Image (cartoon, rainbow, N blue to C red):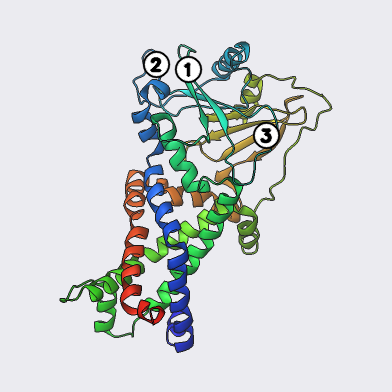
Amino acid sequence: MIKHLARIPRIKFISRKLHLWIGLLFGMVFVILGLTGSAIAWRHELDHMLNPDLLQASSPSGLAVGAPIRFSPTDIQTMSDTLSANPRYGRPSMLVFPEHAGSVVVAWYRPKTASTTAPLTQEVMRQVMLDPVTLAVTGERNWGELGLSRRLLMPTIFHLHRYLVAGEVGKTVIGVSGLILVLTAMSGIILWWPKMRRKAIWQAITVSHGGSWPRFHFRLHRAAGFFAAPVLLVLGFSGCYFNLPTWIVPAVNAVASVTPAVKTLNRSSVQQSQISPAQAVSSALSIFPQARVSRLALPTLPSAPYEVRLRQFGEIRDGDGATRISIDSGDGRVLRVQDPLRAQAGDTLLNWLFPLHSGAAFGLAGRIFITCFGILPLLFFVTGLAIWIKRDFRYFAR
């Protein structure tokens, strides 16, 4: 289909103008996303390096730093009770457990009052770091607060990548930019498509200077774009899904079944939590006894259940995993189970998007690739600008 489109002069003319104006209007956004994405691929490592006093913890006896670690329901209950009993902290809204020994447990606290901030304002949440061995608090920070200090640098880079540090408005802009990136890659392929002759194909995928900088810029832009296009399509599509899932899920569901996203509420008539965090985690582990508990969201409203996240062996998503279980906070019954290893086709596709976006789907090599790939939008912007100035700017200068 692309081959035929590339042979239609009108389509190629429209693609060229579309490609040009997208580059001029969204080029800097793509550059920001690429460079911040390169840093985010190593967010945890960089954060630990910058903030050892905040994020490093004691290692359990007999367990080396960096070794895999698991927490039992009793351990989790003790952590929750320790924070809840301290008037400076109280009951957290979520606990995030480290994957390896030597790292802290992160307790999240939502603002006590409803947010009335403007759409461009970033929501701020409190993070309290707890040593899981000594149960001592190593420090805290405000997640969402912008700054270039050691403690705020990596959160700021994350929020620049995810929200353009502009709250929900920025989130929408990033989501739309994902679709624009898909359009850019598709129009680029149409423009790249050469005549089906050996020499033309070779010139389309190689770079040479030939004594001319404009020619070098053009051929570098063209060849790099050809090899980068498949990755750009994935990054754009997944980036839109993360920020605007209501736009993507129906499209995926049209070709492959996706489990409906519904808010889970307690079914019991109890007006406040009757079961403990340990009981909720035990219920989840009774379904997946070999899984590692990575997160526990505690109910903040009487109608809210516990949400337990686990990672099973064999999941494509590393770190926190994608297994989720909702537990009624009143009577402990299991309300919902999301098992990525037994998911429908559409759910499986969506579960692949984050590991592909972050490069984690291919381990260390994938993360290194994504880190290097993040520089390409800058290359495309510079070479594209050079091509435009040489070839097209003269029309605007008349």
Quadrant where the C terminus lies? bottom left
x 63%, y 56%: residue? 249
Q: CA separation, marks 2 and 1?
A: 8 Å
x 43%, y 67%: residue? 24
Q: Secondary structure at mark 2?
A: loop
Occupied quadrant, residue 214: bottom left
What residue did someone put label 3 on? 326
Q: Amino acid at mark 1?
A: Pro
Q: CA separation, marks 3 and 2?
A: 31 Å
What residue did someone put label 1 on? 132
x 45%, y 51%: residue? 357
Q: Is 40 left, or right, of 198 in this rendering?
A: right
What residue did someone put label 2 on? 58
Tell me if residue 316 can be seen: no
Q: Secondary structure at mark 1?
A: loop
x 36%, y 24%: residue? 52
